[in-house]
Image: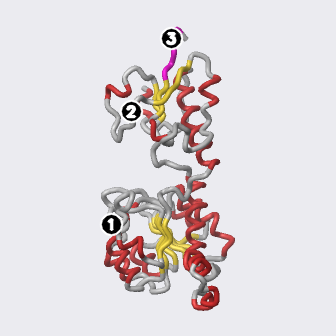
Amino acid sequence: MSEEFRVGLTRDFLTPDGRVGWGDIGLAALDAAPGVEWGFLDADQAELSAAAVAGYDALIVLLPRVTAATVAIAALTLVLAALHRVREKDALVRTGRWHAKLDHMGHGAAGRTLGIVGWGNVGRELSRLAAPLGMRQVASDPYADPAAAAAAGVALVDIDTLVAEADVVVVTCALTPQTHHLLDAGRIATMKPTAYLVNVARGPIVDQPALTRALADRRIAGAALDVFDPEPPDPDDPLLALDNVLLAPHAIAGTGELALGNGGSAIRAVLDVAAGRTPSHVVNPEVLR
């Protein structure tokens, strides 16, 4: 290689004291690659300018894209935490109300209906993980393969049927113009009073003020949210004061395995390009022509 192949990483990987906040993301592979020079961009920008990336041959950008398996595990974590009322039971201990535990009985998963909104990579993996729990599974996704769903024991239904029948509604679909406020006030109103809503996808898929009102009025049992609209939520948002919602800062899927898996995948793609190879997982393969 006649000149260095320059790789830039966005600075949102870094903590204020200069550490890689995600831990090991596989940067040793860049260090070991001959003819490759890498470093962090000079400025922390919400939107990268042409000047900021001039001179780089490849960029590794920290975006909210994570593996299907990891997100599915995180979704199941929130489902079980909601059903077992982990947030409320934690508060009982912290506030000295130990003997009130019988007033906060949880719900077993077996025999209940799991409704998955969006049966793509994450939804399918969630179905696989939840299968041993003995839950009836329904999913709503206009693009889902009926044969694959049937083989997985998942009934494909329309969104209104799912919301009305599910004991836990889990949102795993992409945010598009069609899914914006897919779970609106009207659909939230049709949920069972004993049902929970779990969102690990994107905040605007759920009408957050409508959900907040439903939770405050105890019209549904609770919610578990890893995403919000907007992010981060305003500290004065009434949602944050409710005791029947479990909250995470868009990081419930964040693990060391996730960081290394995603970082390693991105770095392997960069090194493929540097070596003249076609990388895996090209979103727009037409550019290769």
Q: Which is nearer the N-term, disc 3 or disc 2?
A: 3
How packed mark 1 is, by other alpha carbons closer than 10 Å (few <14, some 14-19, many 20 or more), is: some
* Res 36 → quadrant: top right
Circle 2: is it few (<14), some (14-19), or many (20+) Cα within 10 Å? few
Q: In what element is the residue under mark 3?
A: loop
For the C terminus, the image quarter is: top left
**Residue at point 48%, 78% (across, down):** 244
Q: In the figure, 29 relative to 176: above or below?
A: above
Count of marks overlaid on the render: 3
Which residue lies under the disc numbered 3? 3
Residue 83 seen in the figure: no
Q: CA distance from mark 3 to mark 2?
A: 25 Å
- Give me the residue at 57% from left, 61% from top: 74
State the image coordinates of residue 172 (x, y, percent, origin top left): 48, 62
Where residue 177 appears, as percent x and y from the top left, is 30, 57
Q: Quadrant of residue 148?
A: bottom right
Front-lying residue, 202 or 27: 27
Q: Amino acid at mark 1?
A: His
Categorize mark 3 by other alpha carbons within 10 Å: few (<14), some (14-19), many (20+).
few
Q: Which residue is mark 1?
A: 181
Q: State whether residue 20 is above or below residue 6.
A: below
**Residue 38 x %, y %:** 52, 24
As helix, strand or loop, the secondary structure at mark 2 comes to loop
Residue under numbered circle 2: 43
